[in-house]
Image (cartoon, helix red, strand yellow):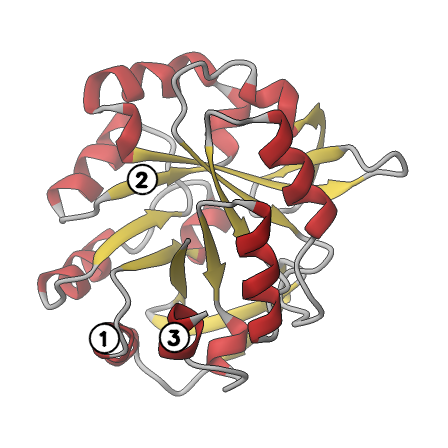
Amino acid sequence: MFIYPAIDLRNGKCVRLYKGDFDTTKIYDETPANMLAEFAAQGATWVHMVDLDGAKAGRVMQADFIADLLADTTLKVEVGGGIRTIEDIEELFEAGVARAVVGSICVSNPALVNEWMVRFGADRFVLALDCSLDANNVPKVRTHGWQQESALSIYDVLANYPTAKYVLCTDIAVDGTLEGPSIELYKQMVERCPNIEIIASGGVGKLEDIALLKTLGVHGVVVGKALYENKFTVAQALAV
């Protein structure tokens, strides 16, 4: 299982949100460049980076800054937040981004995203499906920086992507809480989507959460706030 330490960018700074709420932004002192260096030193191979300004605006906002960051690291980095056009994709790939993380657009325009996947390769895209579980434990998708709920389930969306390789799913009810990941969500996703690499995100607060996710068979887990709040280190997570 891969550990994806997270860097959420807002105005060029490392921040974290609580349950996806932009009004709960907490700025951390560490600069993004220093965090990349620290993650690499501890053995990370991948980083999950989000342009929060882009996610909220609906267009990539920090591409130049991201390009500068990637020029000084050997880490593989996947980037999301506000990707809407092929120009956004090309700009990020030219900047050295290994994978583009597409969220709202993969829900609203699957035909377009499938075109991108054909052109650049499905393995260069992560479908990011943020959700909340309804009363029947059906994961309903949320879009536009987690601010709008869709009537579609995760499985409705994935039915449009026969070649999808990576899917990152976040249960926003637990994101940023450190109270544990949405085990029911990932258990059902692994069972229902055996040909897709599932990346878990949200709620991880202790090393036992990492161990539990590993037993479910997910491909990887994004870890953010737990690292910034010193609950454990990347090296400790990798050891698990």
Q: Which residue is mark 2?
A: 100
Tell me which residue sits at (70%, 60%) in the image.
174
Q: Amino acid at mark 2?
A: Ala
Separation of residues labelled 2 and 3 (CA atoms)? 23 Å
The residue sitting at the front extreme is 215
Q: Amino acid at mark 1?
A: Ala
Residue 200: image location, x then y, percent: 54, 50
Locate residue 69 relative to residue 144 in the image: left or right.
left
Viewer-side label of 1, 3: 3
Q: Which residue is mark 3?
A: 234
Tell me which residue sits at (30%, 80%) in the image.
31
Tell me the quarter of the picture where residue 24 sits.
bottom right
Please say if 76 is above or below 125: below
Give the structural element (helix, strand or loop) at label 1: helix
Locate residue 194 relative to residue 100 in the image: left or right.
right
Q: Which residue is mark 1?
A: 33
Given residues 41 and 119, the one toward you in this image is 41
Give the structural element (helix, strand or loop) at label 3: helix
Residue 133: image location, x then y, percent: 78, 41
Tell me which residue sits at (51%, 45%) in the image.
218
Residue 201: image location, x then y, percent: 55, 54
The label shown at residue 61 is: none
Given residues 118 and 217, the one toward you in this image is 217
Q: Residues within 10 Å of mark 3 (few under 14, many from 20)?
A: many
Labels 1 and 3: the sequence-earlier one: 1
Labels 2 and 1: the sequence-earlier one: 1
In the rendered image, is residue 25 in sight? no
Labels 2 and 3: the sequence-earlier one: 2
Tell me which residue sits at (42%, 81%) in the image.
233
Separation of residues labelled 1 and 3 (CA atoms)? 16 Å
Please say if 63 is above or below 153: below
Tell me the quarter of the picture where residue 7 sits.
bottom left
